């Protein structure tokens, strides 16, 4: 897996990299930085020479090419997590800032020369403003090489990338360094795998799987019909999509997605809402007894785990009243950062990583908060079902180990599915929806047959 750190000077990228080097298991990580090639010593002098634009273009690419061939490729083949402090987008961002707006030749050249380098699976954009950058650089007794306007243009490049590239994760790097580190580490940890030496991954088969799922999602009659069962399409009659009433409905229903067949549960819930919308209003529910909630709501929904649903309905009502004024839409719009929203939703009863991620993606897709960004931090919500699919389709195998627990392979499944989507320039949210529909409709065997047929 390839990860890039990007951002302007003083954004603590190098400090976070040093902490990761000190704290991480070197058997799982490889760290790559500029100037590590035999060209490194001369490169410092070239970069500080403002008139050496041609030399910068070629020398940076040569430095990266050496590091890429000698460190990155071997580490990726060994299934390590490779982290680059400044990668290809760094060259593009700084050349973009140097150009006149009418002249795109330099930018195009740098883009073409970087084509051979693998696109990162994740890019952390460490964001600070230009004044903070210059202040931090000066406080470290380092020379400020760039003007405020130059840094503003670099930031603009990265901010544009955040809007169009789903693999970008923006971090508020003005926070204390340990908070920035913990944010980065919490995401990296989901990709660490301590039994990777036992696992064999057929990356070509993974590529075939995600391409097939993407194609079927848009063309196969099963998927076209089943898409009505996705949580984002659940709207009771008379309720406007993206309204506070829609937010109330999703808030109470999403956590029970695993509790019974989703399409059956959604239909019952919509009927209940259409007859008694007050049962989805926290300010009404708070005044009901447990018996009232059980008889009026839980029984009507026919949950597989009725007591769990009862506790969720009660505890989540108390939570939304105490923290968000009794309106779920206030939670949905409480932050513009998808990762922060995910953490807040995980506090709710019944909202594990998969259900929480599903709701965050629904909030984003339904535009409850049009300003919501950083969706790349809401990682592919893989579970044991998806790990099982990867084994059955031949993506995963554990030689000479007839007995193993699929739960042990959930994290590498998450990592490989995300990487396969990125390798094939596919929207991972579509692949995720396809996998969810296959699991909820018991279509795993059909998928396995389709993959085997496509593989010949």
Image (tube, rainbow, N blue to C red):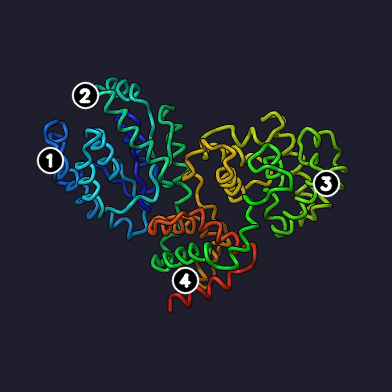
> Who's the residue at 52% across and 34% down the image?
336
Q: Earlier in the sequence, mark 3 or mark 4?
A: 3
Q: Which residue is mark 4?
A: 394
Kindly tell me whether residue 67 is visible in this rendering.
no
> Who's the residue at 78% across and 46% down the image?
273
Q: Quadrant of the C terminus?
A: bottom left
Q: Nearer the viewer, mark 3 or mark 1?
A: 3
Crowd band around label 2 with a 10 angstrom C-alpha radius: few (<14), some (14–19), many (20+): few
Q: Earlier in the sequence, mark 2 or mark 3?
A: 2
Which element type, helix, strand or loop, lies under badge 4? loop
Which element type, helix, strand or loop, lies under badge 3? helix
Q: Position of residue 433 (x, y in %)?
A: 56, 57
Mark 3–mark 4 contact, CB under 8 Å?
no
Q: Which residue is mark 2?
A: 143
Q: CA distance from mark 4 to mark 2?
A: 54 Å
Q: Position of residue 294 (x, y in %)?
A: 84, 46
Mark 4–mark 2 contact, CB under 8 Å?
no
Q: CA distance from mark 1 to mark 4?
A: 48 Å
Q: Which residue is mark 3?
A: 275
Q: Which residue is mark 1?
A: 54
Q: 450 or 323: which is nearer to us?
A: 450
Q: Nearer the viewer, mark 1 or mark 4?
A: 1
Q: CA distance from mark 2 to mark 3?
A: 68 Å
Q: Earlier in the sequence, mark 3 or mark 1?
A: 1
Q: Nearer the viewer, mark 1 or mark 2?
A: 1
Q: Is residue 438 above or below residue 120?
A: below
Which element type, helix, strand or loop, lies under badge 2? loop
């Amino acid at each position: 897996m390839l990860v890039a750190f990007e951002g302007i000077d003083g954004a603590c990228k190098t400090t976070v990299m040093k902490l990761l080097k000190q704290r991480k298991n070197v058997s799982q990580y490889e760290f790559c930085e500029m100037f590590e090639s035999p060209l490194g010593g001369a490169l410092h002098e070239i970069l500080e020479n403002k008139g050496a634009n041609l030399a910068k273009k070629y020398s940076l690419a040569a430095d990266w090419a050496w590091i890429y061939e000698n460190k990155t490729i071997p580490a990726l083949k060994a299934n390590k997590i490779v982290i680059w402090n400044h990668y290809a987008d760094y060259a593009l961002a700084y050349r973009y800032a140097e150009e006149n707006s009418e002249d795109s030749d330099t930018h195009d050249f740098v883009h073409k020369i970087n084509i051979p380098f693998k696109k990162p699976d994740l890019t952390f954009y460490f964001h600070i403003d230009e004044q903070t950058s210059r202040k931090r650089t000066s406080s470290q007794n380092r020379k400020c090489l760039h003007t405020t306007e130059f840094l503003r243009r670099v930031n603009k490049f990265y901010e544009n990338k955040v809007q169009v590239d789903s693999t970008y994760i923006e971090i508020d790097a003005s926070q204390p360094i340990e908070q920035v580190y913990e944010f980065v580490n919490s995401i990296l940890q989901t990709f660490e795998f301590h039994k990777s030496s036992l696992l064999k991954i057929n990356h070509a088969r993974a590529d075939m799987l995600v391409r097939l799922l993407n194609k079927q999602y848009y063309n196969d009659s099963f998927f076209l019909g089943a898409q009505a069962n996705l949580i984002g399409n659940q709207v009771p009659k008379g309720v406007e999509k993206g309204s506070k009433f829609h937010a109330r409905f999703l808030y109470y229903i999403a956590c029970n997605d695993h509790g019974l067949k989703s399409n059956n549960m959604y239909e019952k819930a919509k009927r209940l809402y259409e007859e008694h919308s007050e049962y989805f209003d926290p300010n009404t529910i708070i005044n009901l007894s447990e018996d009232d909630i059980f008889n009026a709501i839980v029984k009507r929904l026919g949950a597989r785990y009725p007591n769990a649903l009862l506790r969720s309905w009660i505890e989540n009502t108390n939570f939304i009243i105490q923290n968000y004024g009794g309106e779920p839409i206030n939670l949905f719009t409480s932050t513009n950062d998808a990762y922060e929203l995910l953490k807040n939703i995980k506090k709710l009863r019944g909202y594990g990583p998969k259900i929480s991620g599903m709701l965050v993606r629904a909030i984003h897709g339904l535009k409850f908060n049009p300003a919501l960004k950083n969706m790349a931090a809401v990682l592919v919500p893989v579970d044991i079902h998806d790990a099982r699919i990867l084994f059955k389709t031949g993506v995963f195998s554990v030689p000479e180990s007839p007995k193993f627990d699929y739960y042990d392979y959930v994290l590498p499944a998450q990592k490989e599915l995300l990487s396969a989507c990125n390798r094939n320039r596919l929207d991972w949210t579509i692949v995720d929806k396809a996998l969810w529909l296959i699991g909820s409709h018991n279509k795993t065997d059909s998928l396995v047959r389709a993959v085997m047929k496509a593989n010949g």
